[in-house]
Protein backbone atom coordinates (compact mmCIF):
# COMPACT_ATOMS: atom_id res chain seq x y z
CA UNK A 1 0.00 0.00 0.00
CA UNK A 2 1.36 3.37 -0.99
CA UNK A 3 1.63 6.03 1.73
CA UNK A 4 1.08 8.67 -0.92
CA UNK A 5 4.36 10.35 -0.04
CA UNK A 6 7.15 8.18 -1.48
CA UNK A 7 7.87 8.83 -5.12
CA UNK A 8 8.94 6.32 -7.76
CA UNK A 9 9.92 8.22 -10.87
CA UNK A 10 8.21 7.21 -14.10
CA UNK A 11 10.25 6.54 -17.25
CA UNK A 12 9.34 9.99 -18.57
CA UNK A 13 10.32 11.68 -15.30
CA UNK A 14 13.67 9.85 -15.28
CA UNK A 15 14.46 10.60 -18.92
CA UNK A 16 13.21 14.15 -18.52
CA UNK A 17 15.50 14.82 -15.55
CA UNK A 18 18.75 14.19 -17.48
CA UNK A 19 21.11 17.16 -17.57
CA UNK A 20 21.03 19.16 -20.81
CA UNK A 21 23.83 21.06 -22.59
CA UNK A 22 23.66 24.87 -22.49
CA UNK A 23 21.03 26.43 -24.75
CA UNK A 24 23.56 28.38 -26.82
CA UNK A 25 25.38 25.13 -27.65
CA UNK A 26 22.30 23.19 -28.84
CA UNK A 27 20.84 26.26 -30.59
CA UNK A 28 23.82 26.13 -32.99
CA UNK A 29 22.33 22.98 -34.51
CA UNK A 30 19.77 25.25 -36.22
CA UNK A 31 20.92 27.66 -38.92
CA UNK A 32 19.07 30.99 -38.72
CA UNK A 33 17.51 32.61 -41.81
CA UNK A 34 16.32 35.95 -40.43
CA UNK A 35 12.90 37.20 -41.51
CA UNK A 36 13.36 39.81 -44.28
CA UNK A 37 10.20 41.64 -43.16
CA UNK A 38 9.48 40.92 -39.47
CA UNK A 39 6.37 42.26 -37.73
CA UNK A 40 6.22 46.05 -37.54
CA UNK A 41 6.70 47.73 -34.18
CA UNK A 42 2.93 48.42 -34.15
CA UNK A 43 1.95 44.83 -34.96
CA UNK A 44 4.34 43.55 -32.30
CA UNK A 45 3.06 46.04 -29.70
CA UNK A 46 -0.54 45.05 -30.50
CA UNK A 47 0.31 41.36 -30.11
CA UNK A 48 1.99 41.97 -26.76
CA UNK A 49 -1.07 43.90 -25.64
CA UNK A 50 -3.64 41.29 -26.71
CA UNK A 51 -2.23 38.14 -25.14
CA UNK A 52 -5.16 35.86 -25.98
CA UNK A 53 -4.19 32.31 -26.90
CA UNK A 54 -2.98 32.01 -30.51
CA UNK A 55 -3.88 35.59 -31.53
CA UNK A 56 -0.45 36.28 -33.07
CA UNK A 57 2.68 34.30 -33.89
CA UNK A 58 6.29 35.32 -33.52
CA UNK A 59 8.42 36.19 -36.56
CA UNK A 60 10.13 32.83 -36.97
CA UNK A 61 9.63 29.09 -36.68
CA UNK A 62 12.10 26.25 -36.21
CA UNK A 63 12.03 23.53 -38.84
CA UNK A 64 13.73 20.21 -39.57
CA UNK A 65 13.11 17.40 -42.05
CA UNK A 66 13.56 13.66 -41.56
CA UNK A 67 14.07 11.50 -44.61
CA UNK A 68 14.39 7.72 -44.50
CA UNK A 69 18.02 6.73 -44.96
CA UNK A 70 19.21 10.23 -44.08
CA UNK A 71 17.69 11.02 -40.69
CA UNK A 72 17.13 14.60 -39.50
CA UNK A 73 18.53 17.36 -41.69
CA UNK A 74 17.78 20.92 -42.89
CA UNK A 75 17.61 22.16 -39.28
CA UNK A 76 16.78 25.83 -39.55
CA UNK A 77 15.04 28.79 -38.01
CA UNK A 78 13.07 30.35 -40.87
CA UNK A 79 10.42 33.10 -41.26
CA UNK A 80 7.01 32.05 -39.89
CA UNK A 81 4.72 31.49 -42.83
CA UNK A 82 2.59 29.10 -44.90
CA UNK A 83 3.97 25.67 -45.74
CA UNK A 84 4.26 24.06 -49.12
CA UNK A 85 2.74 20.61 -48.79
CA UNK A 86 1.65 18.05 -51.35
CA UNK A 87 -2.10 17.38 -51.25
CA UNK A 88 -1.02 13.73 -51.02
CA UNK A 89 0.98 14.34 -47.81
CA UNK A 90 0.24 11.37 -45.57
CA UNK A 91 -0.71 13.51 -42.53
CA UNK A 92 -3.73 14.92 -44.41
CA UNK A 93 -5.07 11.42 -45.02
CA UNK A 94 -4.02 9.27 -42.08
CA UNK A 95 -3.34 11.78 -39.32
CA UNK A 96 0.22 10.74 -38.48
CA UNK A 97 1.04 13.71 -36.27
CA UNK A 98 2.32 14.47 -32.76
CA UNK A 99 2.87 17.67 -30.85
CA UNK A 100 4.04 19.22 -27.57
CA UNK A 101 3.10 22.29 -25.55
CA UNK A 102 5.69 24.32 -23.64
CA UNK A 103 6.25 27.88 -22.47
CA UNK A 104 9.12 30.37 -22.28
CA UNK A 105 8.99 32.69 -19.25
CA UNK A 106 10.71 36.04 -18.84
CA UNK A 107 12.17 36.51 -15.37
CA UNK A 108 12.51 39.84 -13.59
CA UNK A 109 16.17 40.21 -14.69
CA UNK A 110 15.17 39.82 -18.37
CA UNK A 111 16.51 36.26 -18.71
CA UNK A 112 14.25 33.71 -20.45
CA UNK A 113 13.61 30.19 -19.15
CA UNK A 114 11.55 27.16 -19.99
CA UNK A 115 10.15 24.39 -17.79
CA UNK A 116 11.37 20.76 -18.01
CA UNK A 117 12.22 20.73 -21.73
CA UNK A 118 13.84 17.31 -21.32
CA UNK A 119 10.48 15.94 -20.16
CA UNK A 120 8.73 17.31 -23.25
CA UNK A 121 11.52 15.94 -25.47
CA UNK A 122 11.16 12.49 -23.89
CA UNK A 123 7.38 12.61 -24.26
CA UNK A 124 7.70 13.76 -27.87
CA UNK A 125 9.78 10.65 -28.55
CA UNK A 126 7.35 8.42 -26.65
CA UNK A 127 4.48 9.83 -28.74
CA UNK A 128 6.60 9.32 -31.89
CA UNK A 129 7.18 5.65 -31.02
CA UNK A 130 3.45 5.06 -30.60
CA UNK A 131 2.61 6.80 -33.87
CA UNK A 132 5.36 4.98 -35.78
CA UNK A 133 7.39 8.15 -36.34
CA UNK A 134 11.14 8.79 -36.07
CA UNK A 135 12.87 9.66 -32.81
CA UNK A 136 14.51 13.03 -32.37
CA UNK A 137 17.69 13.63 -30.37
CA UNK A 138 16.86 15.52 -27.19
CA UNK A 139 19.57 18.05 -28.14
CA UNK A 140 17.82 18.71 -31.48
CA UNK A 141 14.43 19.14 -29.79
CA UNK A 142 15.84 21.51 -27.15
CA UNK A 143 18.06 23.10 -29.82
CA UNK A 144 14.99 24.02 -31.88
CA UNK A 145 13.36 25.68 -28.86
CA UNK A 146 16.56 27.47 -27.89
CA UNK A 147 17.30 28.74 -31.40
CA UNK A 148 13.73 29.95 -31.96
CA UNK A 149 13.40 31.71 -28.60
CA UNK A 150 16.84 33.30 -29.01
CA UNK A 151 15.81 34.70 -32.39
CA UNK A 152 12.34 35.78 -31.20
CA UNK A 153 13.27 36.81 -27.64
CA UNK A 154 11.33 40.07 -27.92
CA UNK A 155 8.13 38.00 -28.30
CA UNK A 156 8.42 36.69 -24.74
CA UNK A 157 6.03 38.96 -22.82
CA UNK A 158 6.87 40.58 -19.50
CA UNK A 159 3.70 40.63 -17.31
CA UNK A 160 3.59 38.05 -14.52
CA UNK A 161 1.58 35.01 -15.66
CA UNK A 162 2.30 35.66 -19.34
CA UNK A 163 4.69 33.63 -21.50
CA UNK A 164 5.63 32.66 -25.04
CA UNK A 165 3.72 29.46 -25.75
CA UNK A 166 5.80 27.03 -27.82
CA UNK A 167 4.23 24.41 -30.03
CA UNK A 168 6.59 21.74 -31.43
CA UNK A 169 4.86 19.49 -33.95
CA UNK A 170 5.90 16.64 -36.26
CA UNK A 171 3.88 15.25 -39.14
CA UNK A 172 4.17 12.84 -42.06
CA UNK A 173 4.95 15.10 -45.03
CA UNK A 174 5.71 12.38 -47.58
CA UNK A 175 3.42 12.55 -50.61
CA UNK A 176 2.19 8.96 -50.70
CA UNK A 177 -1.29 7.51 -50.31
CA UNK A 178 -0.29 3.97 -49.37
CA UNK A 179 -0.95 3.10 -45.75
CA UNK A 180 2.43 2.69 -44.10
CA UNK A 181 4.78 4.73 -41.95
CA UNK A 182 5.93 7.66 -44.06
CA UNK A 183 9.44 8.09 -45.46
CA UNK A 184 9.51 11.83 -44.78
CA UNK A 185 8.52 13.87 -41.72
CA UNK A 186 8.53 17.58 -41.02
CA UNK A 187 9.23 19.02 -37.56
CA UNK A 188 8.21 22.57 -36.73
CA UNK A 189 8.09 24.74 -33.65
CA UNK A 190 5.93 27.85 -33.70
CA UNK A 191 5.47 30.39 -30.91
CA UNK A 192 2.60 32.61 -29.73
CA UNK A 193 2.68 35.12 -26.85
CA UNK A 194 0.00 34.33 -24.24
CA UNK A 195 -1.44 35.77 -21.06
CA UNK A 196 -3.55 33.79 -18.66
CA UNK A 197 -5.30 30.93 -20.51
CA UNK A 198 -8.63 31.46 -18.82
CA UNK A 199 -9.20 35.17 -19.02
CA UNK A 200 -11.14 35.22 -15.75
CA UNK A 201 -7.97 34.05 -13.99
CA UNK A 202 -8.58 31.31 -11.48
CA UNK A 203 -12.35 31.52 -11.58
CA UNK A 204 -13.67 27.96 -11.43
CA UNK A 205 -14.75 26.05 -14.53
CA UNK A 206 -17.77 23.79 -14.92
CA UNK A 207 -17.26 20.23 -16.14
CA UNK A 208 -19.64 17.93 -17.95
CA UNK A 209 -18.87 14.22 -17.58
CA UNK A 210 -19.22 12.74 -21.06
CA UNK A 211 -21.85 10.07 -21.52
CA UNK A 212 -21.04 7.64 -24.28
CA UNK A 213 -18.01 9.37 -25.77
CA UNK A 214 -14.50 8.31 -24.82
CA UNK A 215 -11.20 10.02 -25.47
CA UNK A 216 -9.07 6.89 -25.56
CA UNK A 217 -9.33 3.14 -25.20
CA UNK A 218 -7.08 0.30 -24.00
CA UNK A 219 -4.24 -0.23 -26.45
CA UNK A 220 -5.12 3.00 -28.26
CA UNK A 221 -3.28 6.30 -28.50
CA UNK A 222 -4.49 8.04 -25.33
CA UNK A 223 -0.99 8.26 -23.84
CA UNK A 224 0.43 9.86 -27.01
CA UNK A 225 0.12 13.58 -27.65
CA UNK A 226 -1.43 13.26 -31.10
CA UNK A 227 -3.96 15.43 -32.91
CA UNK A 228 -6.45 12.61 -33.46
CA UNK A 229 -7.17 12.41 -29.74
CA UNK A 230 -8.17 16.07 -29.87
CA UNK A 231 -10.23 15.67 -33.05
CA UNK A 232 -12.25 12.92 -31.36
CA UNK A 233 -12.83 15.07 -28.27
CA UNK A 234 -14.25 18.06 -30.16
CA UNK A 235 -17.82 16.81 -30.57
CA UNK A 236 -18.28 15.90 -26.88
CA UNK A 237 -16.63 19.25 -26.02
CA UNK A 238 -19.17 21.07 -28.25
CA UNK A 239 -22.04 19.18 -26.66
CA UNK A 240 -20.79 20.16 -23.22
CA UNK A 241 -20.46 23.78 -24.35
CA UNK A 242 -24.01 23.72 -25.78
CA UNK A 243 -25.24 22.49 -22.40
CA UNK A 244 -23.51 25.48 -20.77
CA UNK A 245 -20.35 23.78 -19.50
CA UNK A 246 -16.75 24.90 -19.97
CA UNK A 247 -15.06 21.53 -20.43
CA UNK A 248 -15.79 17.83 -20.76
CA UNK A 249 -14.35 15.06 -18.59
CA UNK A 250 -13.96 11.56 -20.00
CA UNK A 251 -14.47 8.22 -18.29
CA UNK A 252 -12.54 5.05 -19.09
CA UNK A 253 -13.71 3.26 -22.23
CA UNK A 254 -13.65 -0.27 -20.79
CA UNK A 255 -16.06 0.13 -17.87
CA UNK A 256 -17.35 3.67 -18.32
CA UNK A 257 -16.92 4.19 -14.55
CA UNK A 258 -13.52 5.67 -13.82
CA UNK A 259 -12.39 9.28 -14.17
CA UNK A 260 -9.70 9.79 -16.82
CA UNK A 261 -9.03 13.40 -17.82
CA UNK A 262 -10.33 16.39 -19.75
CA UNK A 263 -9.66 16.76 -23.50
CA UNK A 264 -6.29 18.37 -22.79
CA UNK A 265 -5.84 18.53 -19.02
CA UNK A 266 -5.28 16.06 -16.18
CA UNK A 267 -7.52 16.13 -13.09
CA UNK A 268 -6.98 16.08 -9.32
CA UNK A 269 -9.35 15.55 -6.39
CA UNK A 270 -8.71 17.06 -2.92
CA UNK A 271 -10.24 15.37 0.13
CA UNK A 272 -11.25 16.96 3.43
CA UNK A 273 -8.59 14.86 5.24
CA UNK A 274 -5.94 16.78 3.26
CA UNK A 275 -5.02 13.95 0.89
CA UNK A 276 -5.09 14.28 -2.88
CA UNK A 277 -6.02 11.83 -5.63
CA UNK A 278 -5.43 11.74 -9.35
CA UNK A 279 -6.22 9.02 -11.89
CA UNK A 280 -3.35 6.56 -12.27
CA UNK A 281 -1.49 6.25 -15.57
CA UNK A 282 -3.34 3.34 -17.12
CA UNK A 283 -2.07 3.90 -20.66
CA UNK A 284 -5.17 5.81 -21.73
CA UNK A 285 -4.19 9.03 -19.95
CA UNK A 286 -1.67 11.60 -21.13
CA UNK A 287 1.20 11.85 -18.64
CA UNK A 288 1.18 15.60 -18.08
CA UNK A 289 4.29 17.47 -17.05
CA UNK A 290 2.10 19.70 -14.89
CA UNK A 291 0.49 16.62 -13.30
CA UNK A 292 3.94 15.21 -12.56
CA UNK A 293 5.21 18.51 -11.08
CA UNK A 294 2.13 18.93 -8.88
CA UNK A 295 2.39 15.38 -7.50
CA UNK A 296 6.04 16.05 -6.66
CA UNK A 297 5.42 19.43 -5.03
CA UNK A 298 2.50 18.16 -2.95
CA UNK A 299 4.41 15.09 -1.70
CA UNK A 300 7.33 17.35 -0.86
CA UNK A 301 4.96 19.44 1.28
CA UNK A 302 3.91 16.27 3.11
CA UNK A 303 0.56 16.06 1.32
CA UNK A 304 -0.18 12.42 0.43
CA UNK A 305 -1.02 12.00 -3.27
CA UNK A 306 -2.59 8.74 -4.39
CA UNK A 307 -2.49 7.79 -8.05
CA UNK A 308 -5.38 5.41 -8.35
CA UNK A 309 -8.54 4.64 -10.25
CA UNK A 310 -11.27 7.04 -9.18
CA UNK A 311 -14.78 5.68 -9.59
CA UNK A 312 -17.20 8.42 -10.62
CA UNK A 313 -20.00 7.02 -8.41
CA UNK A 314 -17.70 7.17 -5.34
CA UNK A 315 -16.56 10.67 -6.23
CA UNK A 316 -20.16 11.88 -6.49
CA UNK A 317 -20.99 10.41 -3.05
CA UNK A 318 -17.83 11.93 -1.55
CA UNK A 319 -18.66 15.37 -2.93
CA UNK A 320 -22.20 15.12 -1.51
CA UNK A 321 -20.84 14.06 1.90
CA UNK A 322 -18.30 16.90 1.93
CA UNK A 323 -15.38 14.48 1.84
CA UNK A 324 -14.18 15.85 -1.47
CA UNK A 325 -13.73 19.59 -1.08
CA UNK A 326 -11.81 20.63 -4.20
CA UNK A 327 -11.14 19.46 -7.72
CA UNK A 328 -8.82 21.00 -10.26
CA UNK A 329 -7.53 20.46 -13.78
CA UNK A 330 -3.96 21.10 -14.91
CA UNK A 331 -1.84 21.44 -18.04
CA UNK A 332 0.87 23.69 -19.46
CA UNK A 333 -1.50 26.13 -21.18
CA UNK A 334 -3.88 26.84 -18.28
CA UNK A 335 -1.46 25.72 -15.49
CA UNK A 336 -4.10 25.00 -12.80
CA UNK A 337 -7.85 25.60 -12.94
CA UNK A 338 -10.33 24.98 -10.12
CA UNK A 339 -13.34 22.85 -11.01
CA UNK A 340 -16.35 24.47 -9.37
CA UNK A 341 -19.13 22.33 -10.78
CA UNK A 342 -19.28 18.71 -11.87
CA UNK A 343 -22.35 17.41 -13.68
CA UNK A 344 -23.69 14.65 -15.88
CA UNK A 345 -27.15 13.49 -16.91
CA UNK A 346 -27.50 11.98 -13.39
CA UNK A 347 -26.15 14.68 -11.06
CA UNK A 348 -25.16 18.33 -10.82
CA UNK A 349 -22.82 19.24 -7.96
CA UNK A 350 -21.05 22.34 -6.70
CA UNK A 351 -17.51 21.92 -5.42
CA UNK A 352 -16.88 24.83 -3.09
CA UNK A 353 -13.18 24.87 -2.21
CA UNK A 354 -10.07 26.11 -3.95
CA UNK A 355 -7.48 26.74 -1.21
CA UNK A 356 -5.06 23.95 -2.14
CA UNK A 357 -5.70 24.59 -5.84
CA UNK A 358 -4.71 28.23 -5.39
CA UNK A 359 -1.63 27.46 -3.34
CA UNK A 360 -0.29 24.88 -5.82
CA UNK A 361 -1.03 27.27 -8.69
CA UNK A 362 0.92 30.01 -6.94
CA UNK A 363 3.86 27.73 -6.19
CA UNK A 364 4.08 26.40 -9.74
CA UNK A 365 3.72 29.79 -11.44
CA UNK A 366 6.18 31.16 -8.87
CA UNK A 367 8.76 28.51 -9.82
CA UNK A 368 8.24 29.06 -13.54
CA UNK A 369 8.67 32.80 -13.18
CA UNK A 370 11.66 32.63 -10.86
CA UNK A 371 9.86 33.86 -7.74
CA UNK A 372 9.93 30.52 -5.86
CA UNK A 373 12.78 28.06 -5.25
CA UNK A 374 13.23 25.38 -7.92
CA UNK A 375 14.47 22.40 -5.89
CA UNK A 376 14.15 19.91 -8.78
CA UNK A 377 16.00 22.07 -11.33
CA UNK A 378 12.99 22.10 -13.60
CA UNK A 379 13.93 25.45 -15.12
CA UNK A 380 16.25 25.61 -18.14
CA UNK A 381 17.74 28.89 -19.26
CA UNK A 382 17.10 29.68 -22.93
CA UNK A 383 18.37 33.26 -23.21
C1 LIG B 1 -0.91 18.01 -23.14
C2 LIG B 1 -1.99 17.28 -22.43
C3 LIG B 1 -2.13 17.33 -21.04
C4 LIG B 1 -1.30 18.21 -20.15
O1 LIG B 1 0.07 17.93 -20.24
P1 LIG B 1 1.12 19.00 -19.73
O2 LIG B 1 2.44 18.36 -19.99
O3 LIG B 1 0.86 19.21 -18.30
O4 LIG B 1 0.91 20.23 -20.53
C5 LIG B 1 -3.13 16.56 -20.47
N1 LIG B 1 -3.96 15.81 -21.22
C6 LIG B 1 -3.84 15.75 -22.56
C7 LIG B 1 -4.78 14.90 -23.32
C8 LIG B 1 -2.86 16.47 -23.21
O5 LIG B 1 -2.76 16.41 -24.54
Image (spheres, rainbow, N blue to C red):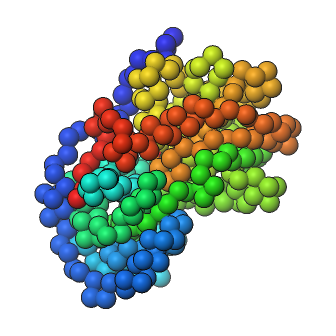
Q: Is the C terminus in the top left, top right, bottom left or bottom right quadrant?
A: bottom left
The residue positioned farthest toward the front in the image shown: 108
Q: Residue at position x 68%, y 32% from top?
A: 353
34 left or right of 53 in image: left
State the image quarter where residue 321 is shown.
top right
The residue positioned farthest toward the bottom in the image shown: 37
154 left or right of 357 in image: left
Q: Residue 137 versus residue 61: which sits nearer the camera?
A: 61
Relative vertical location of residue 177 with respect to residue 296 in this rendering, above or below? below
> Where residue 325 appears, x then y in whole percent?
69, 27
State the image quarter where residue 42 is shown.
bottom left
79 left or right of 21 in image: right
Q: Residue 109 versus residue 298: which sits nearer the camera?
A: 109
- Is residue 201 something one can see in this rendering? yes
Q: Residue at position x 48%, y 40% from top?
A: 362
Q: Residue 362 versus residue 93: which sits nearer the camera?
A: 362
State the image quarter where residue 9 is shown.
top left
> Where residue 332 appears, x then y in whole percent?
47, 50
Relative vertical location of residue 197 with respect to residue 326 in this rendering, above or below? below
> Where residue 289 appears, x then y in whole percent?
43, 42
Relative vertical location of residue 358 with respect to residue 272 in this rendering, above or below? below
- Is residue 100 something one can see in this rendering? no
Amino acid sequence: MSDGLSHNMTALETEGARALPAAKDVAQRFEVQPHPAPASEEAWAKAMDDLSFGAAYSDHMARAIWTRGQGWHSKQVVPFGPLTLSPAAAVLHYGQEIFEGMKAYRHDDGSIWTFRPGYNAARFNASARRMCMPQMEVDDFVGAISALVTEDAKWVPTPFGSSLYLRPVMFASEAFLGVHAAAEYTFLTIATPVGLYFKDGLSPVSIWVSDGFHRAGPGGTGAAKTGGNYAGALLPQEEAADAGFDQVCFLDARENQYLEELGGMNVFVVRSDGSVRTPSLTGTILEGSTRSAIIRLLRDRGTPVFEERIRLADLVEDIKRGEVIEMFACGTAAVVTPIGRLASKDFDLEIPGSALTLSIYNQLVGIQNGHEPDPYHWLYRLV
